[in-house]
């Protein structure tokens, strides 16, 4: 498989690592650390040195209960970083659901739109259809960030996620969006219970029947914290590194083509060990 993006045709014959760069004051794990563009750029350079294949830039937190950010504020956080990073000739993804932001960053040359709403906001799918080479990540989310964990999914999570992703792909391909531009994300943690998240991991390979590559993000999420709880103490997100690496590796072993992570070096090392084993088969 491969993933067509604005400037790069990404080879998915080996797992790729998407390094997270949050230019937000309130993200659940690293909010406030990289709000300044110069700090974010240094962090991004560090992630690339550690082995990131793609940079994923986010300017609005999608943690449960996070307040919405205005269009003007989101662009003010994104553009100073992008104007410099776009020169680096590395794949850059922007995590946004606003069509106005999508258009602005794609016009700047960004490679991928990573949308937790799977292009369901009005005009969003028209924007990506009008940029005929950008990559798109379609993610499953139940409800919306402000309410998703208050009313989590019911029923068979695997079939519901598969149907949602199938329907979104069908809508876009009917609009003329080439399927090699699309990658699918089951949306770990987005309106799902701990058990549902781990069921998605256990049966993740079933989603490959949709015929498109998978992008999976477990990094530092609360479901990992839940299984690590000791004496009623849930570890902070930054203390979930080993669990995050384990989940990422399990996702890769079950067919994920891209894993979205905070801890790039540890994940890259783990994947190298997995790849060395696979090379002997």
Image: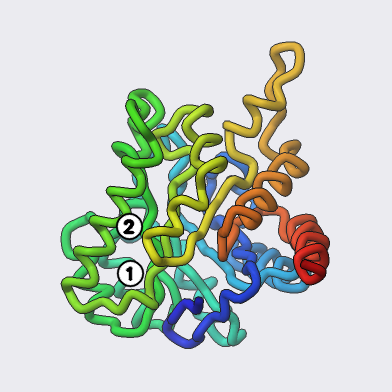
Which labelled disc corresponds to residue 102? Answer: 1
Q: Are marks 1 and 2 in contact (CB under 8 Å)?
A: no
Image quadrant occupied by the C terminus: bottom right
Q: Which mark is residue 123?
A: none
Q: Tell me what residue is drawn at x 70 percent, y 21 percent.
A: 229
Residue 261 location, x and y as percent? 63, 55
Can I make out residue 76 in this image?
no
- Where is 43 relative to 92, above or below? above
Q: Is residue 194 left or right of residue 169?
A: right
Q: For residue 132, what is the image quadrant?
A: bottom left
The residue nearer to you, when weighing 154 against 224, is 154
Tell me if mark 2 has few (under 14), some (14-19) or many (20+) residues whose alpha carbon lies within 10 angstroms of its own.
many
Q: Position of residue 79 (x, y in %)?
A: 45, 72
**Residue appearing at x 63%, y 25% in the figure:** 226
Q: How many marks?
A: 2
Colour style of the rendered protein structure: rainbow
Residue 81 horizontal/vertical position (percent): 54, 71
Callout 2: helix, strand or loop? loop
Q: Can you see residue 14?
A: yes
Give whichever of discs 1 and 2 has the lower sequence position: 2
Q: Nearer the viewer, residue 127 or 277?
A: 277
- For residue 97, the mark is 2
Question: Which of 78/135 is in front?
Answer: 135
Residue at 28% of width from left, 48% of height from top? 163
- Left or right: 103, with 105 as reference point: left
Q: Residue 227, how many percent across, how many down? A: 66, 26
Q: How busy is the neighbourhood of tag 1: few (under 14 within 10 Å), some, or many (20 plus)?
A: many
Mark 1 element type: helix
Q: CA distance from mark 1 to mark 2?
A: 8 Å
Q: Residue furthest front?
A: 281
At x 39% / y 53%, what residue is drawn?
A: 139
């Amino acid at each position: 498989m491969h993933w067509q993006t604005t400037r790069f045709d990404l080879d998915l014959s080996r797992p790729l690592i998407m390094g997270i760069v949050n230019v937000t004051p309130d993200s659940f794990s690293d909010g406030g650390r990289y709000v300044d563009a110069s700090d974010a750029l240094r962090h991004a350079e560090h992630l690339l040195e550690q082995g990131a294949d793609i940079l994923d830039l986010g300017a609005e937190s999608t943690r449960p209960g996070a307040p919405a950010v205005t269009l003007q504020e989101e662009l003010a956080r994104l553009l100073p970083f992008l104007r410099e990073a776009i020169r680096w000739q590395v794949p850059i993804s922007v995590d946004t659901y606003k069509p106005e932001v999508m258009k602005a960053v794609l016009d700047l040359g960004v490679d991928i739109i990573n949308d937790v709403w799977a292009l369901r906001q009005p005009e969003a799918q028209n924007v990506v259809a009008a940029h005929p080479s950008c990559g798109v990540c379609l993610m499953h989310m139940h409800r919306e960030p402000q309410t998703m964990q208050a009313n989590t999914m019911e029923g068979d999570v695997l079939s519901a996620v598969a149907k949602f992703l199938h329907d979104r792909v069908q809508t876009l391909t009917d609009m003329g969006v080439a399927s090699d531009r699309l990658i699918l994300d089951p949306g770990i943690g987005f309106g799902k219970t701990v058990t549902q998240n781990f069921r998605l991991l256990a049966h993740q390979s079933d989603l490959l029947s949709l015929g498109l590559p998978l992008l999976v993000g477990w990094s530092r999420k609360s479901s990992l914290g839940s299984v690590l709880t000791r004496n009623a103490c849930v570890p902070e997100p930054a203390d979930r590194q080993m669990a995050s690496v384990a989940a990422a590796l399990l996702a890769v072993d079950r067919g994920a083509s891209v894993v979205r992570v905070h801890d790039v070096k540890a994940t890259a090392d783990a994947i190298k060990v997995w790849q060395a084993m696979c090379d002997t088969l």
